[in-house]
Amino acid sequence: MNQPKNLDSSIEQVNIKEERGISPLWILPLLALCLGGWLVYSSLMEAGQRIQIYFEDAQGLMAGRTTIRYQGLEVGMVKNITLSKDLSNIYVDADIYPEASDLLKENTQFWLVKPQASLTGISGLDALVSGNYIAILPGSGEAKTKFTALANSPAIQPNTTGLSVTLRSKDLGSISVGSKIYYKKIPIGEVYNFKLDHKTDNVRIKALIEEQYAHLITSKSRFWNASGIGANIGFNGVDVQFESLSALIGGAIAVDSPDDGKAIENGKEFRLYSNIKTAGRGIPIKITLPDNNQISPNGSAIMYRGLEIGQINSLKLSDDKKDIIASATVEPAFTDYLNDGSRFVLEEAKLGLSGVENIGNLVRGNFLTLVPGNGERSREFTAIRKPELIKQDAKALTFSLYADRSFGLTPDTTILYKGIKVGSITHVALVNDRVKFDAMVFEKYKHLIKSNNKFFVSGSVSAELTDSGLNIDVPPTQALISGSISFTSEGKGYKQKSYTLFKNSSLAELAQFKTEKSTELTLFSTELPPITKNSPILYRNLVVGKVTDFNLGNDGVNIKINIEKQYAHLIQADTVFWNYSGVNVEASLSGVNIQAAPLMSMIRGGIGFDNIQGVENKLGKKWKLYSNLSEAQEFGKIIAFTAKDSNAIDKGTQIKYKGVSVGEVSKITPNFSSDNVYVQARIYPEYVDQIAVAGSHFWVVEPSISLAGAENLDTLLGSYIQVTPGSGKAKTQFTLSDQPQGDQFISYTLEALSRGSVKVGTPILFREIEVGEVTDVRLGDLSDRIIITIGIHSEFAYLVRENSVFWNVSGVNMSIGLSGAKVQAGTVDSILRGGIAFSTPDDETLKPQAKAHKSYLLHKTAEEDWALWNAAIPNPNK
């Protein structure tokens, strides 16, 4: 077991030593004191310079939170905000950090930055996150600690990176600090300052172009005020133009730079133009304008494919006062199009019933359109009107139309082919008392223009009545309102220099007949039938031609007709024409015959024809026109007679063959120069070929009544003409005889001291048989005798001998003497008709037969033995 230890022996002895010096416990206070001193020093050093800034109000300011910044770097802090004693301002006490104390100069500017959004842009976006702050703009001069804050942000700092330019303007307009500068509607800079130049009375505007766009500004740059609205108000609406919405509200400047400009130095001065029209931007050109161009000198547009590429800046007269010269500018991007092959076209307003074109031009004026071409560079051009452009186009076919009047047609009148537009009229003018139309046809349709084309006005409703009904042709609405021209494509494949423009298609068709070498005929009628120009010519109810004209001629009307080429063969030597208009009614005991022409002919009139043999169809070189078909069929052929007189005939005297009427006398006229009469007669058609021919013999048949008997009693009611048909060629001129063809006379001459009872027709008797007759009785040339011509029938001519003796046996011869009275009388017929007897002596040798026209003495009476002569005269015909 362990024994307990002595406590006193286990306790160690402690030696207590007395320390001398500073206790380590003082180190901590010393350290705390040093730290506090350092903190005070640091606080003093970090507090920087205390300044005082005056603000109009404290909106957006907070002590201990609102910072002061320079180019985004915090350089100070607001420490206290107090109200001035007069309650008009706010005092802001702020500390500027020591490193920024050099910014506190006499011209240093302070302003409050807070988030702002407007139509001109958004500013102070950094304040939206960190809160409002006070911005500082260092100035120059002596150090200063009290400042007055600006109400708004000052101009951008001139030393900001970019290109600074000065713009000179007569007034500021709507430009303000912060107004944007646009290049092709892209913002490339903004205005940071402006001031009034008292020396020049101009406004100088300072602007800064961003560094990335600085190369766009050259020595040729043009600046203009792009603020506000430009508007064109017209019939096609309101055209409003402005650079941008922000430019509209806050003002803006636009700039353009041609390609040939040079780089500029910082601070270059430019003129600020009031608007784009006066800026003179683009490539300058000169354009000669046509008269009455209605171009505005205040910015009339130059267009290309609907885009405005330039404008007219001014108008003036040329030096010789003959031309109108426009000064214009074109955007540099289109410089390649400015060559001597390009053309400027005047776009004019067109307002009419046919339609509306460029109606806005009525308010804002006309404009020009650029038609690019190829060629050398040019800056002078001549503007042309649109029709002239088409005319100059080498691919279009041009020609002229002529007419006696304009028909109300104007330039741009449409030319149609089968209702399709193939061209138009480019110009209308009066040339040598005729209207000239310059026409053009598009290239793809120029094959339609041929040598025999016929052009006519087609812009109207036309109606044509045919056998099938009423045909109404209504053109398209535009052509109906404004008029149009149509044509037929006929002939060879080449164009004429000019064509005739006809009033309508009907006249064109008539002209077409002539160009197609159609058959043209002239008809003659005593009066004009119910026809008009264009009345149809029908062959068996088929239209084969038309009436082209008619005029008054000698004793009647001349009617000109055309037969179409394909039907020309229908005109033959025996063709007969008749009036084919209306309804022809023939009434007879057998009934009523009604003949109606086709409906078209009944209304418009018409002429029919057919080939009818034996009908008189011509009067000289003209074709005779009968009043109707019946008359034509019954008329026949006209022949003429030469007769001694017309004692036994009259108009209507029948011409007969064996009792059948084959014709009739239609006219009798005296022929004073030939001492005879001219008899015109008509041979019925069915007998023409047998009667109106060479060899036919015509004579007058009269009644003959005597004691010896009566002949031709059928002529008691009227004489007629008997005919013996011939067999020769067709003939129309004949001699009207008084004897049948078989009774050919041998003529002899008798001479007597007096006529006695002898007259024409007195019989010549041989042994009381009539062998001839007296054919003529006249006074001799010396008036000392009567010359009597007798005709002996050829069958009895052998009875007349050279020594034959003739005596008068007419009447009764009575002699009274001492031995009584002696009466000698011929036959009863000779007593009534008279007569001449002859005989041949038998006491001598028979003399030869007398030759024709031998002369004999006509004895007044016969000696006693003459009647007893009994000479034997053989008949040579037996």
Image (tube, rainbow, N blue to C red):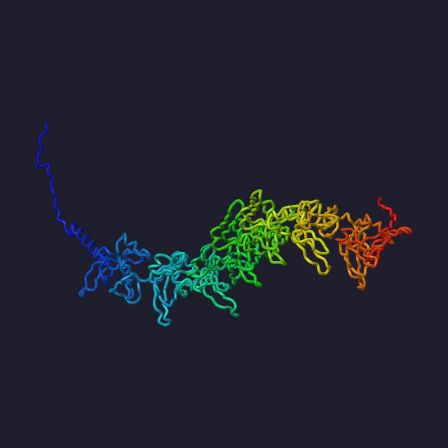
Identify which residue, 602 or 94, lies in the foreground: 602
Identify which residue, 260 or 92, lies in the foreground: 260
Residue 435, position as x, y percentages in the image: 55, 60
Identify which residue, 651 or 85, lies in the foreground: 651
313 relative to 683, above or below: below
Give the quarter of the figure containing the C terminus: top right
Residue 775, position as x, y percentages in the image: 77, 55
Give the quarter of the figure containing the N terminus: top left
* Residue situated furthest bottom in the rendering: 199
The quarter of the displayed image where residue 204 is located:
bottom left
Decide if residue 111 is in sight here: yes
Residue 717, position as x, y percentages in the image: 66, 50
Residue 583, position as x, y percentages in the image: 55, 47
154 relative to 726, above or below: below
Identify which residue, 435 or 2, lies in the foreground: 435
Would residue 756 be found to the left or right of residue 846 on screen? left
Decide if residue 597 is in sight here: no
Instruction: Please report the residue visible at 49 percent of the width from the left and 52 percent of the height from the top.
Output: 461
